[in-house]
Image: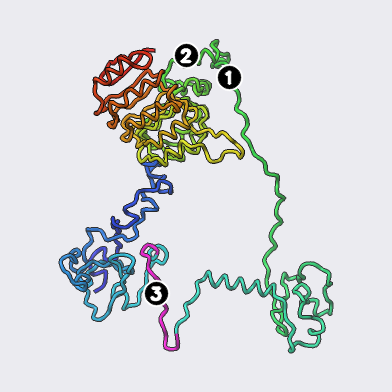
Amino acid sequence: MSSSSRGPGAGARRRRTRCRRCRACVRTECGDCHFCRDMKKFGGPGRMKQSCLLRQCTAPVLPHTAVCLLCGEAGKEDTVEGEEEKFGLSLMECTICNEIVHPGCLKMGKAEGVINAEIPNCWECPRCTQEGRTSKVKGGRERHLKKKPKPPLASAEGPAVPSPSPQREKLERFKRMCQLLERVPDTSSSSSDSDSDSDSSGTSLSEDEAPGEARNGRRPARGSSGEKENRGGRRAVRPGSGGPLLSWPLGPAPPPRPPQLERHVVRPPPRSPEPDTLPLAAGSDHPLPRAAWLRVFQHLGPRELCICMRVCRTWSRWCYDKRLWPRMDLSRRKSLTPPMLSGVVRRQPRALDLSWTGVSKKQLMWLLNRLQGLQELVLSGCSWLSVSALGSAPLPALRLLDLRWIEDVKDSQLRELLLPPPDTKPGQTESRGRLQGVAELRLAGLELTDASLRLLLRHAPQLSALDLSHCAHVGDPSVHLLTAPTSPLRETLVHLNLAGCHRLTDHCLPLFRRCPRLRRLDLRSCRQLSPEACARLAAAGPPGPFRCPEEKLLLKDS
């Protein structure tokens, strides 16, 4: 019974699915390979539709819709207990003819198939094995199935020697040709008298006689450099002593290399200065100068500015002024395209909001290296894989950093962010951290421990506003660290948000009196804090009393 008589699709390969049990299937995406960078969740366009390279299943299984080609039923190995019976009722896919059958449905006598031990439900069916058929596609099919090459068949005369590949034969021929051209012929006892007198055992190829010179009895000069060639472009080579001369064809000589030019950095030409006046169609200039136009543009929003940029080329250049773009909001964007990133860099904003976006680490690093005047950066809701770009980007002017609700942040990752860069100059005694000049830091919803708070007090001493709301590990010892006599935040802290920290108790409230400049203290949603204790703190306060517009919210008028 041929495959064509079994119905349509008898020889079509079925696409396998994940096993969902191997080590590659249960791990998460790496976020660094080219397939991950293409995913929309990592800020890519999402065109390849491929899984992560580290999540390639090592044992793909047949789809649940696969049925036997002969009986039309699915695998029934779960209904029996014996190994032989399970094998006879399980579906097996042939790597040669791609047919999916039950081994028990085949009636091939004593012929047996070759089972692939690396991939489940994969074999070479008895029919293909008996007929001596091999895989049709040598490149992709065998590599996909990880099929092992068959050992060479033994003949009656002896074991068969496997034939080398064409690339191997080509390499061997090239080696033999090089050895033949560069070999030094040895002196043999069978050589003629003329050869033994004229040639010695150490004579090189450059000193051999050319075919035309041997007839005239002339010899080449001993001091000549290079190899003698005849008019026909052939060179005489003596492969062995006493053997005939062989003429070897040579290809054309390679052209001489051009002289190497001196390498230097090619910098782009400086940008032309922006026009101070607006040219009109009549040839004259508008009476309002550029400074007056910019004052008008400062009252417009981002949407109106983009409309003005379409009016003329002069307005388009004026609307790129960084004074018109003090803040850019790209929050809630599924993906950031290269034109969007180029537009952000061209406008040079002082505040950039990238919260809850799919920005990748490469994109964020590209942005931060080109926004040296950035003062406020909001990255709440992003993944730590992209936020880790802060560890390698210089931010000298940063004053506000928002890292609220970032997933999978541990003490080791916060240490990497807070510690000074490792590439400090030798002999430098004072190392500054990356957040040395930050005045406001928002860390709500992170798994912040006391070890991270100690690093924060050491490497961010100028904080005036700190948000630690909904941090599950913040308790009374954390408040003691913030208000200790050795803490630099004791004198600089103005706003402190501890809302939702359920480990705080009434015993930590008197510690806040150590902060003389404290103007706002948010203790809402703290379960173990009583309203009476908060009211007593508001009445006593640090230097002056607080007012309570809401329960457990303490404010002081400046």
Nearer the viewer's eye, disc 2 or disc 1? 2
How many residues crowd around disc 1 within 10 Å: few (fewer than 14), some, or many (20 or more)?
Answer: few
Along the horizontal axis of the image, is 345 left or right of 247?
A: left
Q: Quadrant of residue 257?
A: bottom right
Between the C-alphas of marks 2 and 3, the distance is: 80 Å
Give the residue at x 55% y 34%: 431
| Residue that label 1 marks | 275
Q: Is residue 152 magenta?
A: yes
Marks 2 and 3 close (CB-CB < 8 Å): no
Q: Amino acid at mark 2?
A: Val
Q: Regarding mark 2 in the picture, which secondary structure is present there?
A: helix
Marks 3 and 1 close (CB-CB < 8 Å): no
Q: Regarding mark 3 in the picture, which secondary structure is present there?
A: loop
Q: Which residues are magenta?
A: 143-158
Marks 2 and 1 close (CB-CB < 8 Å): no
| Residue that label 2 marks | 296
- Nearest the camera: 469 or 3? 469
Along the horizontal axis of the image, is 556 left or right of 460?
A: left
- Nearest the camera: 362 or 272? 362
Give the residue at x 46% y 30%: 460
Q: Amino acid at mark 3?
A: Lys
Res. 138 in view: yes
Q: Whole-percent x and y of residue 458?
A: 47, 32
Q: Quadrant of residue 474?
A: top left
Q: Whole-percent x and y of residue 354?
A: 40, 31
| Residue that label 3 marks | 150
